[in-house]
Structure formats: C-alpha cells, structure tokens
C-alpha cells in the first residue's frame, strides 16, 4: 500500500536513534551520563501538582478550543510583565510548543513553498515543515562564528518568490546562540521588507546567562502582521510532560485559520491547562534560582570542553545546549563506539551527533550537541569521560 | 501575506458557529438545552482523579513518544478482553482520537488523493483530510434508510486510482448508525479487494443499545495490513478533557511512519496518560450503568422526535446522536431563529444543523444532529420546545 510522499521524506528522530545501543549498555551495567536530550532534571514547581490535586469538577470536559480563560490570562499577564500587551484573541493554548509550530506552519505553508531556517536547527522542524509539502532553506553558520546567522548578507540571497517565512529558535537549540538586540531587529527588518512571516521559537527565553533582558519578536510594533511567537511551559517551568504551549499572533487572518485547526482537534488537556496557569503565578522567584543553576552548568561544561585539545566552540549564551566541533571524523560512529566499546570505571556518555541538526548533506559530521541538564559534578565527570574517549578513539584509528 | 491553499479550503466548526447568538440569548436570561455538542454530562470515574492526586514524581518529564507503558498496556488488556491481541509496538497513545486520525491521514494521504467517507460525517474529518492535500469522496445515504452506507453498490463506483482509504465512524457520529456484523465484514472485504486502508473510528464502541457485542475492524485477520483503529477515552469514560486517544495498526511500515510524527511532537501529556490507564482498571462495571442511562435517553429522544409531525428518522442504534429530517426548509436559519426570536417559558434549544456534516453542497439543509447528552427529563422538555418551535416557525413562514 502507498504512503504519503511527505512522510516518506521524514526521518525518525536523530536524537533517539542510539536508544538500542543505550539499552544494551545498560544491560551490561554501564552508567550513562545523558547529555543527549533536553529533559531538565529541575523539579517542577509544586504549584502544578497542587492545582491538579485541587481540581474539583465531576466531569473532565473539553476545554474551549483556543484554551481556557485562566491559561490565556496567565500568558497575557506574563507578556505584559515583559512589556508586551496581547488581547485574548491573540493567544492560543496548544499541546506543547510543538503543536503551536505545527499549526502555524500548516496555516502558512503550501507545497513547493520555502521557509528559511538557520542551520544547525532543532531536527523536528524538518518533520513539521515536510508535512506541509514545503522545504527548509538553511542559513549556513559555523562553529567558529558561534553559529551566528542574523546577517543581511547571509539571509537575503536565500529569499525568493517561494519564501514564506523565517523561523529561528532564540535562545538557540542546538547552539545556545542568543541574538543581540540589533540582530533581533535585523530579523524583524528582513521579515518586514520582504513580506515574510517571522516565527520566533522563544521557548528558552528565560535561559540567558549574561544579564540580558527577556527578548521577544513581539516587541516590534511594525511587524504586528508578520510575527508569530511559539512559547511553552516545558522548559520555563521544567514541565515538559504537561504538553502546554502557546501560539501568539496579532495577524487577524492567521488567527481565523489557526482557530479552524484548534477547533478540529477540539481542545488541549483541561487539567494540564489549569495546572499550567498556576505555574505562572508561582513563576518569577522560582526562575531566578533555576537560571543561577544553569549558569553554573554552562560555565562548567564550557570550561571543561575548551580544555579538550582540538575542540572548537564559542561560549553559549543561552538555552541549555552547547554545540561544538570535536576532533573526531564522525560523531555518529564515535557515539556508537562510546556505547559499544568504551567505558571508564563502568561509565560512558551520550550526546546528540551533529549531522541530524543540518539540512545540508554532510554538514555537522564532526559536531555534537551537549545538553547541560545534569548537575555540575556530573557534568565534570561526563566531560572527563568525553576527553578520555576522544583520546582512546583517535589512538585506535591511527 | 499568503496563506496555505489547504487551510483556505477549511471552515470553522459548523457545530460552534452559533456561539455568538448563544451568548446573546444567555445575556437575556434564556435557558438553553444543549443538544448541539457531544459533551457527556456523566461523571468521570474517580479513578482518574485518584491517579492524578497520587502522582509523586518531582519532575513532570516527557513521556516516551509512543506512550507510557502503563497506558499502552491498559489498551492492550482492553482489546484482549474483546478477543483481539495487540503487540506493544502496534499501539500508539495520542492526544485524543483527533491526533490519532491526523497522524494516520498524514502518513497515508498525498495531494490529489481521495478518501471515501459516508456522509453525513463528523465535520472535523474535513479539516484533517484537507491538511494533507487530499479530498473526501462521500458515500450518499438517506435519513429514510437510517443512513446505512455499507453497500457494495454504493461504495465500489466511488473507488478509483487515487483512492487510498475508507474511513467510517462506527457506531456513527452524527447518525447513530451501527453496522451489522455482515456490513462490517463487507467494509473489510472492500478494503482488502481494492488494497485500501480501512480506518475505523471506533470511539463510541461501547455505546450500542441492542445487546450487540463490542465490534472492531481489528477482528478480521485478513486485513491486518489495511486496518487502522482510532480509539479514545473521551466518550468511553466521559473524559473528553483528558485528550487521550489511541492509534492501532499492525502494518509495520505505517508504524514506522507514525513513529516519526510521534517523535516530532515529542510526547502526550504524562499525567493524563497515567490517569487514563487507571480508568481502564475501573472501567467495566462503570460502563454497564452508563449504557443503561444512554439507552433510556435514546428511547426518550426517539419517541419524542417521532411524535413531531413531519420528522423523518430511524431509531439510532448507537453512539449518543440522532440525525433527523425536520419539517423546516433550512435548519441553519431555524437555529438562528431559535436563539434570537423563540422562547417558551424563557427556554430554548440548540442542535447542530445538518449541512455542516455533508461534503456535497446543499445536502442536509433540512436535517439536524441531536446529541442526547442530557438526562431524560431535560430531553423531554427539549423535544417539547423543538415541537413547539417548529409549529410557530412554520406558521410565521406562511
């Protein structure tokens, strides 16, 4: 039987493909330091579980399709706190940031259309874009430049009559790159001048370590029709399993189209919306401690990484990832070896190999993404394991 | 700015379009009997809320992409109970039956493809199919025949080289039609003979009132590659707000494709999966009482409906809907009048106008779908209001 040509073009997650080797290593009793997935170890604020326990309606009914008023209200209040006022009709609650992005792309992309995305990028963008029949046109970046992409010279040559949107994660996954105010303004200018949607995936907004103010493309009044914000409670409140995200747009026509999809899928989980609204009440103080913890982790992993001979990496400014070039020829093969052949004191390490974050073939083969979602002591040990493994692996290859 | 041609073809929900008039009627103090939406009033089993209150992990983490083992296990046990053994890799937990259907359609439909669906059908099928670039080819049915569609003569002429699948809701929404074992077998035969996927939306499986055994297209071993089952806890356990559904397929290639989409959207809400698994433990006895209650409601609404002169309607055998022809020229205009002009003792009634359930233009304009999700006394009153309103409306029109 025949399958969709669009799904045939998609791949399974490159981040999860070493799972079978991981299972085998676990069976042999090997301890793995997981730097491969962005699942924070930080506790979810108790406000979430309190709200869930206090839910007192006898029927767990459908929520309104655009979201429950309490959750929409919580998001509006949060944005008002960073100086951006949104109306209730401009905010849609979604099943994670993933659904927010999927809805936005389904509304704006057609077969043959193009969307410009800096590479390396979050691999799931590929699947969401492919499902619409459109393709990603990547902006090339380099480890040496800290993966910066917000440059008129790099982006303008990629725009053509099929280009519909610019999509970027800021702070960046997988790179940890944070745009300066001038770079963010440039992205807005490019969208405005060329009549493109500007999709800002801003789920890591709070994760900035240089004292930067919390930034959003929603700040720019002159791109009200262009800006689409993807947001989520997942990383902000270490509540990935709530699957509560947000799609924000002031574009009336886009609101109407998004509402069609929201209505077709009926609603977002009721209890998770009630509990996520409570997170926003409890959020600000909680977040300062979290940021301090991640800053310490960032400093630790960056220091240890740059001590490894041959590593190329600029200090990441945000999110909880660092992308780096390793002195090995193929980080896919190296990861497999780390799980099947290497161990030190019965321990090894996992990362996400770089190639899966690129649309361009053969790019990123000597790169890795490391998620610093472990405590500082574990991160030190994981980096020591990585350094030792690189040495052994390259000695073997000679 | 340009939007997707696919989203331009979709409409907002026909079931929700009278919402502004409803708000106005409420403001005037008019009580509305809601027969327009399929939101049951039956209490969700306490097992759900108990499980949620007992959740004790500090981090609300991502669940595995195909679902948590407890929930997959609960679904497998439930199906084993109706004589169908599924492997763990054949069951995917989804965000409601809606996502299960959306994933299946995205895997199998391409631009220009066709999918055969009996009309009247659940209107959201339109949006999910349109998003893939395919179109619905409807099987015509009539109120006089109780909306039966499982006929070789009706279906085979609709199959062509672009046909990829047959999709049907059994028991039926909006019609309440339940296929006989022979009719179900015929659907399987047609899928098998023509190499089509057979998508059974079976979320109302338990809601049958004539002592029928619980049926599924999963029973037929000779369509293992063709059968795709859409299921959900929403109606079964009156837990619509949990947004927990299931996609089931034995087709290995489809499993691989479905997994790509499951991985891209990361996971389904963790707490709702834990709690929904607990529903299945508590389920069987709960359901016998629920079925008795709905049977009484079905009997009540059908008796009262057929007492109204000029109504055409066969006794519905399942789900909690009845589709009927009313003796008015346009049920859209009539619904508006019911909200803006009619009231009796300050009460009125809402239904879902029929046209929105048809793909064929101008079909269903004198039909309505009534959801019998109220208790029997309220249903009696709602039907009295409908009878009185029809009389007054037609007198005005003369």
Image (spheres, coloured by chain):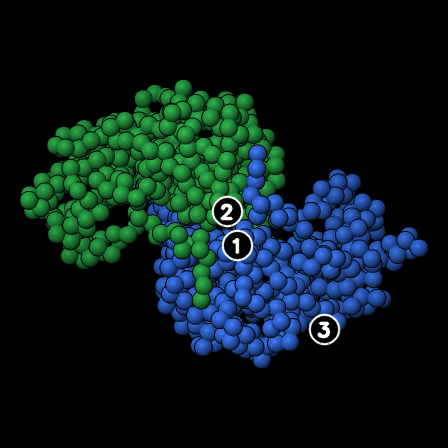
Chain colours: A green, B blue
Horizontal side of B9 relative to A235 (left or right) equals right
Q: Nearer the viewer, residue A64 or A263?
A: A263
Callout 3 touching callout 1 (CB < 8 Å): no
Q: Using the image, name the chain to which the residue with label 2 belongs.
A: A
Which badge, 3 or 1, is on the more N-terminal residue?
Answer: 1
Q: Quadrant of residue A395?
A: top left
CA distance for labels 2 and 1: 9 Å
Q: Percent x, y for residue B103?
A: 47, 56
| Viewer-nearest of discs 3 and 2 | 2
Q: Chain of mark 3?
A: B
Position of residue B279 relative to residue B147, above or below, is above
CB contact under 8 Å: marks 2 and 1 = yes
The local secondary structure at tag 2 comes to loop
Q: How many marks?
A: 3
A23 left or right, relative to B346: left
Residue B228 x, y percent position in the rendering: 48, 66
Q: Look at the image and tell me in which quarter the N terminus of chain A lies.
A: bottom left
Q: Which residue is mark 2?
A: A111
How would you rate the neighbour count of disc 2 (Cα within 10 Å): few for under 14, some for 14-19, many for 20 or more? some
Depth check, front residue: A129 or A303: A129
Residue on which disc 1 sits:
B111
Tell me the residue at 54%/63% (across/down): B162
Q: Residue furthest right?
A: B398
Dot 3 falls on a residue whose secondary structure is helix
- Inter-mark Cα distance, 3 to 2: 41 Å
Looking at the rendered structure, the secondary structure element under dot 1 is loop
Is residue A267 left or right of A217 when viewed as pictured? right
Q: Which residue is mark 3?
A: B145
């Amino acid at each position: 039987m025949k399958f969709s040509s669009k799904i045939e073009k998609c791949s399974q997650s490159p981040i999860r493909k070493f799972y079978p080797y991981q299972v085998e290593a676990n069976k042999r009793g090997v301890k793995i330091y997981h730097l491969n997935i962005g699942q924070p170890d930080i506790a979810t604020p108790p406000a979430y579980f309190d709200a869930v326990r206090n839910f007192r309606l006898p029927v767990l009914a459908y929520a309104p399709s655009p979201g429950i008023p309490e959750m929409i209200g919580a998001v509006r209040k949060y944005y008002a706190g960073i100086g951006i006022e949104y109306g209730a009709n401009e905010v849609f609650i979604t099943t994670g940031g993933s659904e927010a992005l999927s809805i936005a792309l389904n509304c704006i992309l057609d077969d043959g259309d193009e969307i410009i995305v800096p590479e390396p990028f979050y691999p799931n963008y590929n699947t969401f874009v492919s499902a619409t029949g459109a393709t990603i046109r990547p902006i090339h970046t380099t480890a040496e430049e800290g993966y910066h992409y917000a440059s008129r010279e790099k982006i303008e040559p990629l725009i053509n009559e099929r280009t519909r949107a610019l999509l970027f994660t800021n702070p960046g996954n997988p790179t940890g790159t944070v745009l300066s105010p001038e770079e963010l303004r440039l992205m807005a200018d490019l969208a405005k001048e060329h009549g493109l949607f500007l999709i800002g995936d801003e789920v890591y907004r709070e994760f900035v370590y240089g004292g930067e103010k919390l930034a959003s493309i929603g700040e720019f009044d002159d791109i009200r029709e262009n800006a689409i914000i993807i947001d989520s409670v997942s990383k902000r409140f270490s509540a990935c399993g709530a699957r509560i995200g947000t799609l924000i747009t002031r574009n009336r026509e886009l609101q109407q189209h998004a509402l069609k999809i929201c209505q077709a899928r009926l609603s977002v989980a009721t209890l998770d919306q009630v509990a996520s609204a409570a997170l926003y009440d409890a959020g600000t103080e909680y977040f300062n401690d979290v940021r301090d913890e991640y800053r310490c982790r960032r400093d630790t992993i960056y220091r240890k990484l740059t001590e490894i001979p041959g590593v190329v990496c600029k200090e990441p400014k945000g999110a909880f990832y660092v992308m780096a070039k390793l002195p090995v020829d193929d980080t896919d093969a190296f990861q497999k070896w780390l799980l099947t052949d290497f161990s030190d004191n019965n321990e090894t390490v996992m990362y996400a190999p770089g190639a899966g974050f690129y649309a361009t073939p053969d790019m990123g083969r000597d790169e890795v993404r490391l998620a610093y979602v472990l405590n500082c002591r574990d991160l030190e040990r994981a980096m020591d394991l990585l350094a030792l493994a690189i040495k052994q692996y390259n000695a073997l290859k000679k």
